Amino acid sequence: MTDPAQTTPENQSALVLFSGGQDSSTCLAWALERFERVETVGFDYGQRHTIELTVRAQLREAMGRIKPLWQQRLGQDHMINLSALGEISQTSLTRDMEMAMGSEGLPNSFVPGRNLIFLTFAAAIAYRRGIRHLVTGVCETDYSGYPDCRDDTIKAMQVALGLGMERRFVLHTPLMWIDKAQTWNLTDELGGPTLIEAIRDISHSCYLGERKVHDWGHGCGHCPACELRADGFMRWRNHQK
Ligand code: ZN
């Protein structure tokens, strides 16, 4: 069989940084709507919420069932082992410690340089696969203050990757300027109630890896990721009424 990577023009294909969380799931749908071929990449760095990684396959399958066109466009999944990242960073995402604010005004869930490393690995895969567009769900609106989610960081990375690999990459951040309630709006626009349901019921955002059932999806209900997600969902739903 011909490898689709060899037949789809570079500027028609995208690689989505896909963790299995709400944001990256929305980005995957966004990319499936726009590009002729869409591949996904996930990173295993010893995060406590490894459940994120197990829901990825379920989400990809569910997305394929939403629109035949999406099924046709959805390509290969890449899984990268970045256990070294977990080893060198002492954070509440990778160690058994309480979530708290650190002395520099950053939550201790901050893994230094995480998105820079993810984007570099993603670009290396994109280079090999002949893909020009990288899509990531980072957001400056209601993020936890992570400096590597900022628009300026991403723009600088686009320049650095382009120069360092001598290849033109375009970094897309569809969620950069919208909040969690508006993210649900976008989800609705992209795939209607079926996509809302798939992302709500399958995707995983909880830092603690818990899967208790709530109106807004699964999670512990009290970690910063759950609070953000619950608040966004409630605001979106109240706006619907
Ligand atoms: Zn939680």
Image (spheres, rainbow, N blue to C red):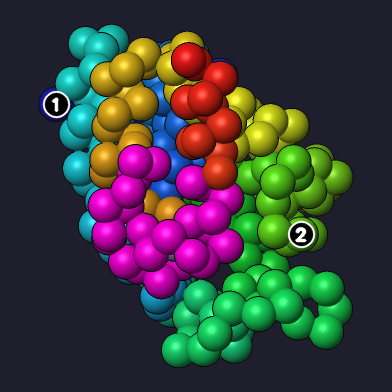
Residue carrying label 1: 1
- Ligand 1 is found in the corner quadrant, namely bottom left
Q: Which residues are magenta?
A: 206-230
Across and down, in percent, residue 238 comes to 52, 25
Q: Nearer the viewer, residue 239 or 209?
A: 239
Q: For the residue marked with disc 1, what is the amino acid?
A: Met
Circle 2 sits in a helix, a strand or a loop, which is it? loop
Q: Residue at x 35, y 26 (%)?
A: 196
**Count of labels shown?**
2
Say if residue 58 shows up in the picture.
yes
Q: Nearer the viewer, residue 86 or 211?
A: 211
Q: Residue at x 43, y 54 (%)?
A: 205
**Residue 209: quadrant of the picture:** bottom left
Q: For the residue marked with disc 2, what is the amino acid?
A: Gly
Residue carrying label 2: 145
Q: Residue at x 27, y 40 (%)?
A: 201
Q: Is the residue at mark 1 in contact range of ligand 1, meaning its CB lies under 8 Å from it?
A: no
Across and down, in percent, residue 62 comes to 21, 30
Q: Is residue 78 above or below residue 141?
A: below
Query: Nearer the N terminus, badge 1 or badge 2?
Result: 1
Q: Residue at x 50, y 35 (%)?
A: 234
Q: Is residue 72 above or below residue 224?
A: above
Q: Which mark is in front, 1 or 2?
A: 2
Q: Is residue 6 magenta?
A: no
20 sits left or right of 169 in the view? left
> What numbered label is drawn on residue 124?
none
